[in-house]
Amino acid sequence: MNQIIVMVGPAGSGKSTYADILARTMNARGLFTVVVGSDDIRAALYGDASDQRDPARVFNLMWEHSCEGLNNGLNVIYDATNLNSKRRAALVKKIKELYGKSVECVCMYMVASCDACIERQKYRARKVPEKVIRSQFSHLNPPEYDEGWDQIRYI
């Protein structure tokens, strides 16, 4: 059974770092895995990972790349903030409608304080403004099993 692992958390919570480590670990164990990241897609499209224009295009491409990975027998790590419970539930529903029980839906919830996420900006190449992080925290819906998850992991 393949997995789609959906990262959840504000900027600076460690999603991309953890996703990369997890993918390397899974690949080393023969559980072939690809990371599909919204920042990577923005960088490829616009030359700048922080360019926030046309989110529908970015997330349509994330969906296409995720399906491509799953269709090729890979595990997929879906790396974006994924703060909204309704959007997460819609994503899980689409996956289950398309893949049924052949794909396990795992939520990886990165637990970090707002202050820690702001502090981490000092060490990042691409810094997210404090007001954006505070806004993300105010809009964050922690994941719940009624969104359709097979597993929720707290990191």
Image: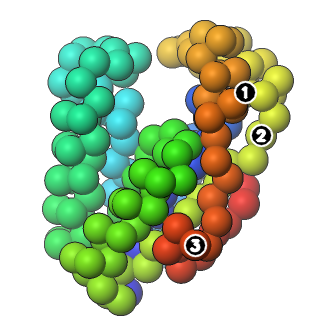
Front-most of residues 59 and 42: 59
Residue under circle 3? 146
What is the x, y in percent for residue 11?
59, 29
- Picture quadrant where residue 131 is located: top right
Three-letter code, disc 1: Cys
What is the x, y in percent for residue 144?
64, 65
Q: Residues within 10 Å of mark 2 (few under 14, many from 20)?
A: some
Disc 1, disc 3: CB below 8 Å? no
Three-letter code, disc 3: Asp
Helix, strand or loop at label 2? It is loop
Residue under circle 2? 112
* Viewer can see residue 112: yes
Q: Earlier in the sequence, mark 1 or mark 2?
A: 2
What is the x, y in percent for residue 10?
62, 34
Mark number displayed over residue 96: none
Residue under circle 1? 117
Q: Earlier in the sequence, mark 1 or mark 3?
A: 1
